[in-house]
Amino acid sequence: MTGAAILRVAKPEDAGAIAAIYAPFVTDTVISFETHPPDTDEMHRRIVSTLMTYPWLVAERAGQVVGYAYASQHRTREAYRWACDVAVYLSPPAQGQGLGSALYTDLLRILTSQGFRRAYGGIALPNAASVALHEEMGFRHLGTCTKVGFKLGQWHDVGWWQCSLGSSEGAPEDIIPFDAWTG
């Protein structure tokens, strides 16, 4: 797949393309611990609800969505609100071309400007490509949960990586919700 990619904020009408990119990660790999791929309606719901607080970006080539990255809630307790989880997914033809780095660069920039202080990536292991991407983006390995997920007939480990987005000194200001963020 060639041509320059355009990175932009996801729209609810991207749900079908995003669901199609994500489905093989659910059905054929342990990269996602979901066991049933979300349909277009469910992905539409996820995009709409995510964009209220967190960014969701897509990479588009020749008018087609070829990858995406988004942030989501890290934990539900109030004191965790300055932390978020992040993920990136690319269609197979778009992999290995720097789009994951480009999406993460924009995503982390936006999260920082919203006031988030930490981003976390959970990676089902082994996954050398995802580990390399996260470490290239400044994430550092925190630890590994062993045999934490059962999928495709066996137990799998998940490593956790953390990226610092801002200072942890002093009291933070409130997060700017993405739907109010003016960047």
Image (cartoon, grey):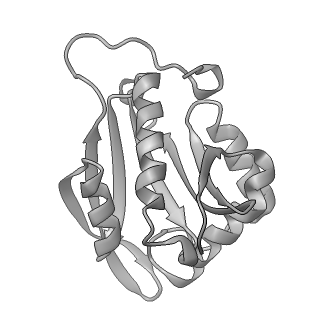
* Image coordinates for residue 175, horizontal then vertical, percent: 47, 20
Relative to residue 182, is residue 33 depicted above or below?
Answer: below
Q: Does residue 9 appear to the left or right of 96 in the view shown?
A: right
* Whether residue 73 can be seen here: no
Callout count: 0
4 left or right of 150 in image: right
Q: Is residue 176 above or below residue 49?
A: above
Pick whichever, 53 or 34, lies toward us: 53
Where residue 71 appears, as percent x and y from the top left, is: 50, 43
In this view, the residue in front, 139 or 1, is 1
Res 1 seen here: yes
Residue 160 is drawn in which quadrant? bottom left
Question: Which residue is located at x 23 percent, y 22 percent?
Answer: 167
Q: Quadrant of the N terminus?
A: bottom right
Q: Residue at x 42, y 34 (%)?
A: 109
Quarter of the image containing the C terminus?
A: top right
Residue 56 position, x and y percent, is 59, 44
Residue for point 24% across, 56% down: 135
